[in-house]
Amino acid sequence: MDNTNLDKAMEIFTLLIVGEEISSAQHVDLYEDYRNNSEVYDILTSVLKKSNLSLYEFGNSLYVTAGDGNRIFGFTNDELKRAIGLRLNKELYLAYFIIYNTILLFYQDSGSFSYVDYVRSEDVIAQTDSSLKQAMKALHDKALNDVEENSFQTLAALWEDMPLVPVNEDMASLKAARGSKTGFVKLVFNFLISQDLFFESQGRYYIKPRFRALAENYYEDNRGRLYSIVTGGDRDAAY
């Protein structure tokens, strides 16, 4: 093994895990080493695998994300609740479900990838309403196991108990908070912004390249059972 190549691979690894951009525009030499030097590529891939990290390339940029159960580079449930501003596990699972439905809004058409240019909180609320209705219908039409049935019943009850907005507040002045559907979605959006996945302009939320890199790789590979339940079945033309 060439020590120079080892040093380059470890420099790429170090920069990626602290959120630095490695692309055709930033750290160009390292990006070219990753693309064109097979030993650098192999060393980096091995280190990432042993660290339970996945590497995605999108738009001539590199991105990493933590694998399942990664306690070093990922979030524990308690850490994630604090980061979003939640208290209960069922609220966290609802946040996961909202993020999943946000992805569905952007990636329903496998031919063009991006289905819409942006989303608003009301779009995600409508999508979440629709997905939960489909999931509750599946309780009667499909053979869901006990865990699935209890999970969707819990999420549906929590979501339905929330008003659209708190009493005596309007949409324009509403802040991110746990007490309403709109405020809850804004909590989730704020977290996505903090993770460099979204940016907001005049109430519209746009996806950033990091979001696209994760969604167009991880989501395609892992849509699985939840996708089948909330969409009513596998559709070849949809993600």
Image: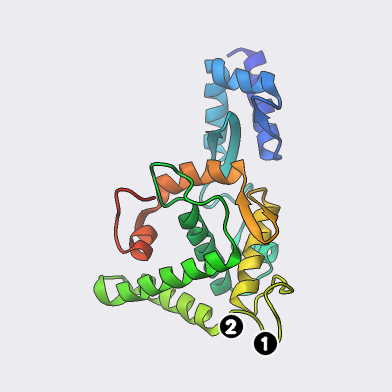
Q: Is residue 155 above or below residue 229?
A: below
Q: 210 or 67, which is in the foreground?
A: 210
Residue 232 x %, y %: 31, 64
Image mark for residue 167: 1
Q: Assess disc 2: are there few (<14), some (14-19) or many (≥20) residues with their C-alpha within 10 Å of its C-alpha.
A: few
Q: Quadrant of residue 210?
A: top right
Q: Quadrant of residue 225?
A: bottom left
| Numbered disc 1: secondary structure | loop
Image mark for residue 9: none
Whether residues under marks 2 and 1 lie with C-beta atoms below 8 angstroms apart, the answer is yes
Q: Quadrant of residue 152?
A: bottom left
- Residue under the image location 66 percent in, 83 percent down: 166
| Residue placed under numbered mark 2 in the picture | 163
Residue 165 x %, y %: 63, 80
| Numbered disc 2: secondary structure | loop
- Residue under the image location 38 percent in, 58 percent down: 227
